[in-house]
Amino acid sequence: MKIVRILATLIVTLGASAALAQGYPSKPVRVIVPFTPGSGQDIFARVVCQKLSELWGQQALVENRPGAGGSIASGVVAKSPPDGHTLLWHSTAFATNAALYANLPYDSLRDFAPIAPLLRQPFALVVSPAVGVGTVAELVAAAKARPGQINYGSAGTGSGTHFAAEKFRLATGIDAVHVPYKGGPEVNTDVIAGRVTYWFAPIVMAAPGVRDGKLRALGVTSGQRSGHLPDVPTIAEAGLPGFDYSLWSGLWAPAGTPVDLVEKLSRDVARALAAPDLREQLGKLGGEPMAMTPAQFAEFVRREIEDSTRIVKAAGIRAQ
């Protein structure tokens, strides 16, 4: 009789899960974004949520909850009902925060149900033409010839631009000095002016300066060349095989969200990202759509956290 009761409970649970997925969404969906309105991730989220609203016949509403390195927004979602109506849009910072902060108010792996990656944005390694280097190999040689005398900028300690630069520094073994800024535009201006030797710029920020001759792109950080700078080799092609680091975005639900619902959400995201008009919009903004199953995305996130932890320890990065 005990086995019968267990089977009956399982059947009821699975049936309820399937019914929830079939009727989803039954009301507007809150998409919590841990970035300020008008930021790059906010713009991406609004573009994708507009397409999801069209598919669902219910609004996917972006709700900005910036602060505390993204932990405020993540904490809201972790504590929300697991019914798919409150979701988290986060970036690479989801993984780097897990590596940087020992006392987050949630467990990055246990308190969320990974749904799908959304898009990635490669960085471009750029210098001023006045620096006098034209390739990744030449930059590395210049840095090794003058250890501790070449510097690199970032959009802030712990930012994606900082992690990209540290991964590069560790891979090449160079000794360069980190100069953190409060944002990308400031460091880009100082690289153009020659006050900073190099930085890893978001591709859409780098491309105009490269086309105008104010910046020289030595390589892009993605595994494939970027359509924004098609003539620029990947850093892997330029002498660092396997180098791959991009700013990515993903979508999560609270832990305990039914598997059927997570899979439906993943399929809906894939449908949205496959739409030609959305792909065109994202492309103009520098975003390259990604595709994974929930299980693949969960494994991807786990690896990203491990890689970020390795970089934090090896480079001695401290949260600020």
Image (tube, rainbow, N blue to C red):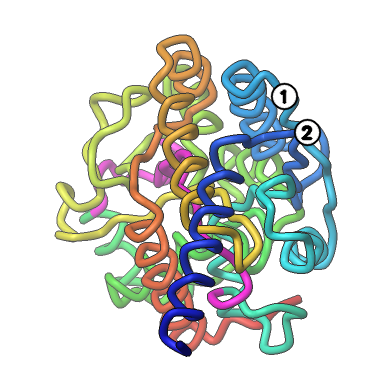
Q: Secondary structure at mark 1?
A: loop
Nearer-the-camera pick, 294 or 229: 294
- In the picture, which quadrant includes the C terminus? bottom right
Residue lying farthest to the top in this orientation: 277
- Which region shows up in magenta? 109-136
Q: Position of residue 73 (x, y in %)?
A: 78, 58
Q: Amino acid at mark 1?
A: Gln
Q: Residue 27: which disc? A: 2
Does residue 29 lie above or below 6 as drawn?
above
Q: Position of residue 22 (x, y in %)?
A: 54, 37
Left or right: residue 309 compared with residue 98: left
Q: Identify the residue at horizontal 57%, vertical 20% (top origin).
A: 55
Residue 190 visible in image: yes
Q: Quadrant of residue 31?
A: top right
Q: Earlier in the sequence, mark 2 or mark 1?
A: 2
Q: Secondary structure at mark 2?
A: loop
Q: What is the C-alpha distance between the residues marked 2 and 1?
A: 6 Å
Q: Position of residue 282 (x, y in %)?
A: 50, 23
Task: Check if mark 2's residue and mark 1's residue have beta carbons within 8 Å.
Answer: yes
Q: Identify the residue at horizontal 47%, vertical 81% (top origin).
A: 309
Q: Residue 58: which disc? A: 1
Q: Identify the residue at horizontal 57%, vertical 77% (top origin).
A: 110
Q: Amino acid at mark 2?
A: Lys
In this rendering, the count of numbered labels is 2
Does residue 310 lie above or below 16 as drawn?
below
Q: Quadrant of residue 101?
A: bottom right
- In the picture, which quadrant includes the N terminus? bottom left
Left or right: residue 237 compared with residue 39: left
